[in-house]
């Protein structure tokens, strides 16, 4: 049998690839000028190289972001690319794009054929896009919409965009395959593999917002930081800020992080929605529209020292029967404040609550809602359900309470209105000046209700919005039971320095009892109760293991593993950052003169949660 000469085969392949690379490079060099409108002066951007702001003007035509106005230069860009961006990053771009063109050529051919069969016409289409330093260039895509679709109009501005998308196009979009021809745009030098997604030339708001963060000064990318952190769901200011974060931290680690994160996007991304930029807002509610920073933050604290009146009695209705928080509060109040409260519950599922007379209650405590889910993998119907329950139901209950003469409405909002915890290694401390900025539809559904109910307050109807951090206790759901299982089973656990605000159910119930016995003077109050100390995840695991008579070794040797896992895309990175990320309220924001609710510390809270009765030390004396 004749022996295969691998050395000769590899040599031939290398020579062939070399020739192909040279030919492709020559073609790219010739095409680059026309791809940047070199001979079309009327198509060039007069603001190229300038720093800009957006100036609204109702008399001008509407731009691609749906706003009337124009961009105005305020100076020259002083951005200077570093060594990594100019040489290393470009080298990666050339190698990866050329390799992509070669390896994916069968796929590109198959897609082209499918497009032709589905809707005869051109396979590719070009759009004028904003490139590096605001230089216009022609971006290439596989055509995913019908030939009759209006050109240069963002998807979110089309009337019923679904009618224009072809069957093949829908599949291409959902898996980002329509972006594949941009591999050529990368090779030619108009784009990079990683960078802010190139906006349309007339998306003036996006351009102006990105200029705040130097995000227009780098090459746009096939995928980027904003692309893997929400994509079409993100509002323009949030998207621009994420693009700015990429520019600020640009380097090999950041590019690898974006590249790995994009693999999940290509596998099928639920955040790709027909309607484009800001879809979270379109499928959500609009109570936050036009609100000032102060209105979004709310009136933090009581504004003065308060006094708990233990001689008074309150009749309370909990809207949301059977909930963990509602049941816990009812039991705690009966045990600790039995003479002060007459508490009833009502089920919100069947709609019969609408027939109940609210006028006999002093306080309505609204706890009904849908808790956190896997927000990265849900359909529009599920998102709508969140808004229907967390927002619409809350508003309806509050309106009924006000109409029927209830004196006080307490809404169980959440810390989630401030977004998710930041990844391990970054700090996040929320204070009275921090503006709520949800990172997903779940947080937005809570914030919409938070804002809406506060607007209903007046001199005769007081509204309190509670924004607690993660609540845990015996029988609780969520992250704590998962952490407890790990503490009881693992022999070793990473010793990682992080900080999180948490709230034990007993501290919450004590807080609720006291604020319900306060004669609140101001119409609107926003409160953020939390445990007395911030929690380090490693300390909590050690306490759980100790209380359960388990031995667990904590070691800093595993910190590199946490670092690596934290940058991994998908659920692994998300879980690691949930466990070891940072998310805190400042201590002062949770202190209210006249209210003393932090009755147990971490150690005692674990004892009560795990049901270990042999630990009876005074929690106030046992600080970690």
Image: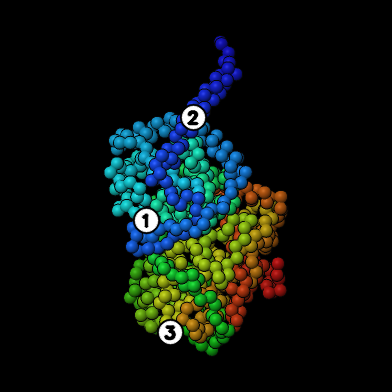
Q: Is mark 1 on a helix, strand or loop?
A: loop
Q: Image quadrant of residue 386? A: bottom left
The mark that comes first in sequence, 3 or 1, is 1
State how far apart marks 2 and 3 are (Cα). Answer: 75 Å
Q: What element carries label 3?
A: loop
Residue 16: x and y in percent read 52, 22
Residue under pointer 2: 26
- Badge 3 vs badge 1, beta-carbon distance below 8 Å: no
Q: Image quadrant of residue 429? A: bottom right
State how far apart marks 1 and 2 are (Cα). Answer: 37 Å
Residue 63, numbered label: 1
Residue under pointer 3: 459
In the figure, 227 relative to 506: above or below? above
Q: What residue lies at 65% left-to-right and 52% top-to-bottom?
A: 490
* Image quarter in which the C terminus is found: bottom right
Foreground label between 2 and 3: 2
Question: Could you say which is closer to the camera, residue 490 or residue 397?
Answer: 397
Q: Is mark 2 on a helix, strand or loop?
A: helix
State how far apart marks 3 and 1 are (Cα). Answer: 43 Å
The mark that comes first in sequence, 1 or 2, is 2
Q: What residue lies at 42% left-to-right and 82% top-to-bottom?
A: 458
In the figure, 612 relative to 48: above or below? below
* Image quarter in which the N terminus is found: top right
């Amino acid at each position: 049998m004749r022996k295969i000469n691998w050395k000769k085969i590899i040599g031939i392949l290398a020579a062939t690839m070399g020739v192909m690379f040279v030919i492709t490079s020559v073609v790219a060099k010739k095409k680059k000028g026309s791809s940047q409108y070199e001979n079309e002066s009327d198509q060039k951007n007069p603001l190229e190289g300038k720093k800009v702001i957006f100036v609204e003007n109702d008399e001008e035509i509407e731009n691609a972001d749906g706003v009337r106005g124009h961009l105005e230069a305020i100076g020259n860009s002083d951005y200077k690319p570093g060594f990594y961006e100019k040489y290393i990053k470009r080298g990666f771009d050339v190698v990866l794009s050329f390799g992509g063109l070669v390896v994916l050529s069968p796929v590109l051919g198959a897609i082209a054929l499918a497009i032709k069969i589905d809707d005869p016409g051109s396979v590719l289409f070009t759009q004028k896009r904003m490139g590096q330093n605001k230089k216009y260039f022609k971006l290439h895509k596989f055509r995913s919409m019908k030939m009759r679709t209006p050109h240069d109009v963002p998807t979110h501005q089309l009337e019923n965009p679904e009618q224009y998308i072809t069957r093949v196009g829908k599949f291409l979009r959902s898996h980002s395959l329509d972006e594949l021809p941009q591999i050529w745009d990368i090779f030619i030098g108009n784009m990079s593999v990683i960078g802010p997604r190139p906006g349309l030339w007339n998306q003036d708001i996006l351009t102006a917002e990105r200029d705040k963060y130097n995000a227009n000064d780098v090459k746009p990318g096939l995928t980027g930081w904003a692309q893997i952190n929400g994509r079409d769901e993100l509002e323009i200011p949030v998207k621009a800020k994420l693009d700015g974060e990429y520019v600020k931290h640009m380097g090999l680690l950041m590019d690898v992080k974006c590249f790995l994160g994009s693999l999940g996007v290509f596998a099928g991304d639920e955040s790709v929605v027909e309607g484009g930029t800001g879809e979270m807002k379109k499928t959500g509610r609009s109570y936050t529209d036009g609100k000032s920073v102060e209105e979004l933050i709310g009136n933090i604290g009581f504004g003065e020292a308060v006094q708990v009146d233990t001689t008074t009695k309150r009749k309370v209705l909990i809207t949301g029967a059977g909930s963990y928080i509602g049941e816990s509060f009812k039991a705690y109040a009966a045990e600790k404040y039995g003479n002060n409260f007459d508490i009833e519950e009502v089920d919100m599922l069947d709609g019969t609550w609408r027939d109940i007379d609210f006028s006999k209650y002093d306080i309505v405590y609204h706890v009904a809602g849908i808790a956190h889910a896997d927000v990265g993998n849900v359909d529009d119907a599920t998102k709508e359900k969140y808004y229907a329950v967390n927002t619409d139901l809350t508003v309806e209950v509050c309106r009924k309470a006000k109409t029927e003469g209830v004196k006080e409405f307490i809404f169980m909002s959440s810390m989630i209105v401030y977004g998710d915890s930041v990844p391990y290694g970054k700090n996040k401390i929320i204070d009275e000046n921090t503006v709520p900025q949800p990172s997903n539809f779940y947080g937005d559904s809570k914030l919409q209700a938070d804002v809406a109910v506060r607007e209903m307050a007046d001199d005769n109807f007081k509204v309190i919005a509670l924004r607690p951090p993660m609540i845990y206790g015996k029988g609780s759901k969520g992250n704590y039971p998962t952490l407890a299982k790990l503490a009881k089973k693992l022999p070793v656990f990473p010793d990682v320095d992080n900080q999180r605000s948490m709230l034990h159910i007993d501290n919450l119930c004590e807080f609720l009892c006291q604020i319900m016995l306060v004669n609140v003077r101001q119409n609107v109050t926003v409160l953020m109760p939390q445990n007395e100390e911030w929690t380090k995840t490693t300390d909590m695991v050690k306490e759980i293991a100790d209380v359960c008579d388990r031995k667990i070794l904590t070691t800093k040797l595993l910190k590199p593993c946490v670092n690596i896992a934290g940058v991994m895309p998908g659920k692994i990175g998300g879980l690691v950052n949930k466990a070891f990320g940072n998310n805190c309220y400042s201590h002062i924001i949770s202190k209210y003169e006249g209210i003393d609710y932090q009755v147990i510390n971490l150690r005692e809270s674990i004892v009560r949660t795990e049901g270990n009765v042999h630990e009876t030390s005074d929690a106030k004396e046992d600080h970690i």
